[in-house]
Image (spheres, rainbow, N blue to C red):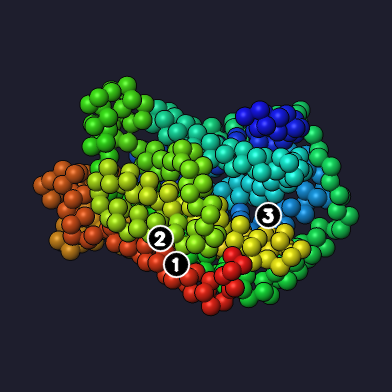
Amino acid sequence: MSKIGATFKKFPRTFWIANSMELFERWAWYGLFAVLALYLTQSTDTGALGFSQTQKGSIMGTITFILYLLPLFTGSLADRFGYKKMLIIAFVILSSAYYLMGQFRSYTAVYATFLLVAIGAAIFKPIVSATVAKTTDESTSSIGFGLFYMIVNIGGFIGPVFSSKLRHIYGWHIVFLMAASAILVNIILAIFFYKEPDRVKNEDSFWASISKSLKNILIALSDMKLTVFLIIMIGFWTMFNQLFYTLPNFIDQWVDTAMIYNWIHGFSPAIASAVGTKEGIIAPEMMVNLDAGFIILFQIIISSLVMRLKPVNSIITGIAVVSIGIGLAFGTNNGFYVIAAILIFSLGEMASSPKFTEYIGRIAPKKKEALYMGTSFLPVAVGNYLAGVFSGPVYQSMSDKVTLLQLEMAKRGLEIPAISKSFTQNDYFRKAAELLHTDQHGLTQMLWNSYHPYRIWMIFSAIGVVTIIALFLYNKFVLDNKKA
């Protein structure tokens, strides 16, 4: 413990400021992203936007795809113009974009402002990572990046908790105000407390820097062993991202979380009130946020269990666990089973995700580790885009409650006004229940039994299985598995 304490004292103030900024940036991002699928698609009479699942998938998938590609270029801006200056620019963009995103209700305007969020986040990401790297050395980097990873998860856990509780009290607009306010804290930290770390100034022009970055990426991708591995890992990120893209909508539309609320209320009404809503349910984002909570609790334990495994074996094991969790436990509308699914999912994530970059480092030739590491964002970006496709038009056709109910009403020849500004999704559900002589619970169960919306998770599980098989064959026949 004294050794760790001595290491902590070696970190300069800028290290702690960078970690603080990461905390508030993740607070803002996950505070919004954890509820974004709900905000985009829920009924307009709740203050949400009432977009289709396809529109939701397009906004979330395309913009996040762009976010993970942009650091390829924005890192050059920081090297040329300075970390502090670009941090302030990033935070001004982020804070303004978060606020404006809550003011607009048209698809185009929401898309454009979320794109601004992506630009601000893409400027920030490489700067904060570089700052941590430049404020640690060989004796402190392991603990330093461990702390940084922990901060990411703490921010990712706190944000959704606050947005969930606040939105149920004050309405959806407070989520965007909270995100903008968290970034305003970062503006203060950047202006008054952040000290520019030592760096080699990039004298190249902006376009020359971009050209050099693209050339380096192409050099790395010319190694087919690396390229094939990155293509295979797209499957993992496509499956993994359904935690934020599809699961919130699935829980909102199909899962009975009232049973969880009632169980908690049975032994502690205070706890039930703290984690639940006034309607007597557990909000979807609070359920999804269990993943971050489990990571905070169990990551060290899981990491210690898989540390002796080769990275590829750990990745395969993790993806297998994730696939099992998705395939079995999400195929139910029982809230307790969904909690078990999220736990299984998080255990697999903890075993596989941290090993991803380690594996790239293992297969990289000597003195090309950094060059290869620069490609690690590519499968994450493409995985986000494909996640948007599956959570958009695929989910809408297979599992969207609104679409399936409209189909059922048409089959029965029952006429209900089309959903519009004056006749919301909730109006449609109420009218359908009335015509079918049932309540909302009975309506949900009838659609569940008739259309089996849980089948969407079988697709995601199958993606995981294909990824496992491809990764196993790749490691056995393409790569010298003694190396990784």
Pick whichever, 326 or 365, lies toward us. Answer: 365
CA–CA distance between discs 1 and 3? Answer: 29 Å
CA–CA distance between discs 2 and 1? Answer: 7 Å
Number of residues whose C-alpha sits closer than 10 Å to that of mark 1, classed few (under 14), some (14–19) or many (20 or more): many
Indicate which label's residue lies in the foreground, 3 or 2: 2
Indicate which label's residue lies in the foreground, 1 or 3: 1
* Residue under numbered circle 3: 71
Number of residues whose C-alpha sits closer than 10 Å to that of mark 2, classed few (under 14), some (14–19) or many (20 or more): many
Question: Are discs 2 and 1 less than 8 Å apart at CB?
Answer: yes
Residue depicted at x 37% and y 66%? 462
SS category of the residue bearing label 2: helix
Q: Is residue 331 visible?
A: yes
Q: Can residue 89 be seen in this view?
A: no
Residue depicted at x 46% and y 37%? 297
Give the residue furthest to the right. Answer: 203
Res. 468 mark: 1
Q: What residue type is labelled 3?
A: Pro
